[in-house]
Amino acid sequence: MQPRDRLRNALARDVRKGGRPALVVHVWESQFRHSATVRALASAPGFDLAAVIRDLDEALADAAAQTTQQGVALARNAGLEATGETVEAEVSVWRAIASLARTRSPFRARSTKRLSRPA
């Protein structure tokens, strides 16, 4: 099942239950800034890799904000009162979600992405 389909199914269940407004959260992380290889290359003379990384991260942030707004639209179309928040993960996605949950109460996390567990 695709993430969008899982989200629609989850939203349908939440609408049937009723209750509090929905907060749609999309957490993104820089694939570039946090890479040890890229950090090593950024210190090399003669090339402004830092500027390239900033541009790439800006594009990722913009795409993440669009994803959040799409999720908010899906939630609203499903009948929920929804708002959205886009968060950059500085350490890990899970820690960003946990940090957000500590500032929001009550909070129920629902993921549309299946996370693999280490063997």
Image (cartoon, rainbow, N blue to C red):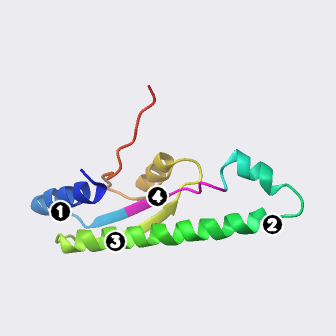
Closer to viewer: mark 2 or mark 4: 2
Marks 3/4 in contact by CB < 8 Å: the verdict is: no
Determine the residue located farthest toward the front in the rendered image. Answer: 46
Closer to viewer: mark 2 or mark 1: 2
Location of the C terminus by quadrant is: top left
Q: Separation of disc 4 and disc 1 at Cα?
A: 24 Å
Q: Separation of disc 2 and disc 4 at Cα?
A: 27 Å
2 or 3: tag closer to the N-terminus: 2
2 or 4: tag closer to the N-terminus: 4
Q: Separation of disc 3 and disc 4 at Cα?
A: 14 Å
Q: Separation of disc 2 and disc 3 at Cα?
A: 34 Å
At label 3, the amino acid type is Gln
Marks 2/4 in contact by CB < 8 Å: the verdict is: no
Q: Is residue 97 left or right of residue 80?
A: right
Residue occupied by mark 1: 19
State the residue in front, 4 or 97: 4
Residue occupied by mark 4: 27
The numbered mark at residue 48 is 2
Please report the residue visible at 41 percent of the width from the left and 53 percent of the height from the top. 101
Picture quarter containing residue 20? bottom left
State the residue in front, 118 or 26: 118
Confirm whether the magenta stretch covers residue 5.
no
How far across and how far down the image is residue 59, in percent? 56, 70
Are there few (<14), some (14-19), or many (20+) residues within 10 Å of tag 1?
Answer: few
4 or 1: tag closer to the N-terminus: 1
At label 2, the amino acid type is Asp
Are there few (<14), some (14-19), or many (20+) residues within 10 Å of tag 4?
Answer: many
Please report the residue visible at 42 percent of the width from the left and 67 percent of the height from the top. 85
Q: Separation of disc 3 and disc 1 at Cα?
A: 22 Å
Q: Is residue 84 left or right of residue 31?
A: left
Residue occupied by mark 3: 70
